Amino acid sequence: MNYSKPRLQGIELKKRYGQHFLKDRTYVDRMISAVHLDNTVSVMEIGCGEGILTGAILEGPCKQLKVFEIDGQWAEHVQNKYGSDSRLHVIENNILDVYWDTLLPEAPWVLLANLPYQITFPILYLLQKNREMFLEGVIMIQEEVAQKIVKTSGRGHGYSSLYFQHYFDWKLMDKIAPEAFYPAPNVFSRLLYFKPKKVVQVIEREEEFWKFIKLCFVQPRRTFRNNLAQSHFDIEKLDEQTLKKRAEQLSMEEFLQVWQLLIA
């Protein structure tokens, strides 16, 4: 039996890169309409694939469009297809290997990207680290991950929710069925709008705080007492009611109150 590998434009799609290419223009237009683009704004795209989003961005105004594509065949394809537009710069590189500091002089940036599922969180952490250079953006990610990021309590609410909500405002947009992609993934996707917060609340001993949050969610369904029992924190500083709670029940403000008690 012949199990042929999926191809587009005569190019074999590579599973190791998580290549699921959007084919429904409706969602591309939704991404672009959710942000403000003009001739002063630089646009970043991560993973152009066959260029459906690239071409749509170039139909409107922008200062430049910088595309990072790990697959040399697709980088060449998009360069050949849209390279006559001087605003387009296709960079054949893994976005995780890029020195984002080099992008700062060309800010402000808007990010529009269909992110590969397997590197979504590494990219989000890079986005957080370099958030000052971004105005806003729309990313397409796995539905489950998008829901986790926007959760404020209950099951699924955790370190990722607290961390990324602390630095960004998020808004769920369209839910996208697997059939909108080729080849179809096994999960639903979601468009997720973000905007870096202009004012970020200062956290005392911030690096330690985020380690503490990770510790609280080691076993999300366990109580504070159980998760912190083997830690160096003096949990006797916390009242019995707090110690009986599970981490997923607490808001960011409540975590900050607990933190202040523990480091006092």
Image (cartoon, rainbow, N blue to C red):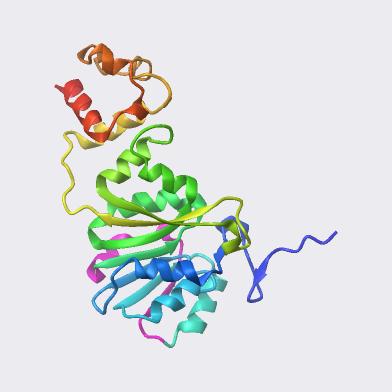
Residue 159 is drawn in which quadrant? Answer: top left
- Identify whether 188 is placed above or below 69: above
Tell me residue 14's x, y (percent): 62, 61
Q: Residue furthest right?
A: 1
Can residue 98 be seen?
no
Residue 240 is drawn in which quadrant? Answer: top left
Q: Is residue 87 magenta?
A: yes
Residue 151 is drawn in which quadrant? Answer: top left
Q: What residue do we see at 46% from left, 72% from top?
A: 53
Q: In this rendering, would 197 be left or right of 65?
A: left
Chain part drawn in magenta? 85-107
Q: What residue do we see at 31% from left, 41% from top?
A: 163
Q: Residue furthest bottom?
A: 84
- Identify whether 166 is placed above or below 114: above
Q: What residue do we see at 38% from left, 45% from top?
A: 149
Can residue 239 be seen?
yes
Q: What residue do we see at 27% from left, 62% from top?
A: 134
Between residues 10 and 36, which one lies in front from this camera angle? Answer: 36
Marker count (numbered): 0
Check the picture and name the quadrant holding the C terminus. Answer: top left
Q: Is residue 7 magenta?
A: no
Tell me residue 193's x, y (percent): 35, 57
Tell me residue 143's x, y (percent): 48, 49
Check the picture and name the quadrant holding the N terminus. Answer: bottom right
Tell me residue 9's x, y (percent): 63, 76
Q: In this rendering, would 209 be left or right of 90?
A: left
